[in-house]
Image (spheres, rainbow, N blue to C red):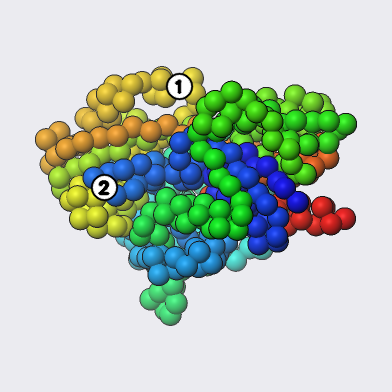
Amino acid sequence: MRVGIVGAGAAGLAAAYELGLAGHTAEVFEGAPFLGGQASTFDVNGTPLERGYHHLFRSDTAMTDLIGELGLAHRLRWIDSNVAYFSRGRLWRFTSPIDLLRFGPLPFEDRIRLGLLTVGLQRRKEWRSLEAQTATEWLLEHAGRRIYDVIFAPMLRGKFGKYHEDISMAWLWNKFALRTTSRGKGLIGKLKEQLGYPTGSFGEVFDVLGATIQAQGGQVHLRTPVRRVIVEDDRATGLEVAIDGGSPERRDYDMVLATTPSYIFPKLVPQLPAGYLAMLTDKVYLAAVLVILELDRPLSPHYWTYIGDRRIPFLGVIEHTNFMPPEKYGGAHVVYLANYLERDDPLYAMSPEELYREYLPHLKRLNPAFDESWVKNYHHHKVDAAQPIVTRGYSERIPDHRTPIRGLYLANTTQIYPEDRGTNYSVRMGRMVARMMDGDSRA
Ligand SMILES: Cc1cc2nc3c(=O)[nH]c(=O)nc-3n(C[C@H](O)[C@H](O)[C@H](O)COP(=O)(O)OP(=O)(O)OC[C@H]3O[C@@H](n4cnc5c(N)ncnc54)[C@H](O)[C@@H]3O)c2cc1C
């Protein structure tokens, strides 16, 4: 069977690879000039770096299995997680139960309460009943206002911006449930969460995946936006594509898979019936906006810092070179200043220079010694459709991978739940939908 795939992110490439393994021929079309979608890379002093910070958890087995199948397991490094909270004017380490006991912004009884609550959520298996409440409602009831304001509000705001009070409790539960599997072995190991990174970058993983698809007989086209899915007699029969930005041409397929965000998909297929369309158009996404600094020295000793101070206009600080060594990036200490924003937010509209200027004075709050002369270069990236908003009762509103149009399938990040979207789940979903298409073609 010949399959046309829209999008060369983790989902589209994983699906093409899985179809290739089953003996089918996949042709992938990507509008951007690079592979990897949201997990794509750009060049920092000769080394690829993700546009948005990326790491893996130990529980990300779909991604680590794929990396192994591609012969890149030796490139994967695991390090102990190193998380901090910026609260009450200082950084607090927040990685282990001992850090929790020392966490000054909460009174001692709240630290114990938070520890017990964490263990309870990690052990819990059932999540459907949690969907009836938002994380904010559940936490205010079970943890109390102080713990919510100091710990969870900054964490949720860092991920969901202005929607942070609307997020389903099932989503938060899943974060806790997965964290148990992200920990190492042995007594000391169990106290520590580990994070993984492919040392050649996620870009290398997608490059090798693209080459593997081609070796299977498939094709991957960059700079080739898909204009429309061709539908004849209620069946998807092909794609209209603009190869290398040229004039649109028709390609015929037995089946089509789209991995585009939900707001793009209906533009490619205006024939979608109202019920299915409603499940696409009700989805809300935030964009990730990143300022990436190259410093001549470290900003902090932490990899990941949640910002619990509303005066600071960014929500997360990710110091990548507290994970990978700065020598890899020509000696630069790489720091992401991250925000999740709506596309009508003034910070989203700012030019790279304006946003850099807006953020700069606040770095002194994190490290009083910071001086602008430390900044040797900076970059700016926006990733649209970065974070789907998953609200109360979300599981009822997830569109099926099999669309109402025969032979047409959808696999995008709004269909990942209650897990947090991530490369692991896009790979898992892409491979699963490819097997679904294979099964349907045989039936
Ligand atoms: C800032 C940030 C940090 C993240 N951190 C992590 C992390 O630490 N760990 C982790 O695992 N994940 C992380 N993620 C999430 C992860 O990157 C995504 O969940 C995953 O890459 C999504 O893959 P996808 O293939 O489902 O979607 P996408 O990557 O969005 O791929 C869809 C592709 O379709 C293409 N496309 C759209 N329309 C068309 C068209 N008409 N024609 C042709 N092509 C089209 C797009 O250009 C895109 O390449 C992060 C994401 C962001 C934004």
Viewer-closest of 145 and 129 = 129
**Residue 410 drawn at (x, y percent):** 70, 41
Label 1 – label 2 distance at C-alpha: 33 Å
Is the residue at mark 2 in contact range of ligand 1, meaning its CB lies under 8 Å from it? no
Label annotation for residue 345:
1
- Residue type marked 1: Asp
**Residue 52 drawn at (x, y percent):** 40, 42
How packed is label 2: few (under 14 Cα within 10 Å), some, or many (20 or more)?
few
Disc 2 target residue: 46
**Residue 214 drawn at (x, y percent):** 56, 53
As drawn, 434 above or below 8 = below
Assign a secondary structure to mark 1: loop
Viewer-closest of 50 and 123 = 50
Is the residue at mark 1 in contact range of ligand 1, meaning its CB lies under 8 Å from it? no
Q: Is residue 259 visible?
A: no
In the picture as drawn, the residue positioned furthest to the bottom comes out as 186
At x 83%, y 30%, the residue is 232
Assign a secondary structure to mark 2: loop
Indicate left or right for 206 with 407 as reference: left
Circle 1 or circle 2, nearest the eye = 2
Indicate left or right for 268 with 225 as reference: right
At x 29%, y 21%, the residue is 354
As drawn, 302 above or below 291 = below
- Residue type marked 2: Gly
Indicate left or right for 427 with 237 as reference: left
| Quadrant of res 392 | top right
Q: Is residue 292 visible?
A: yes
As drawn, 69 above or below 93 = below
Viewer-closest of 148 and 54 = 54
At x 46%, y 52%, the residue is 207
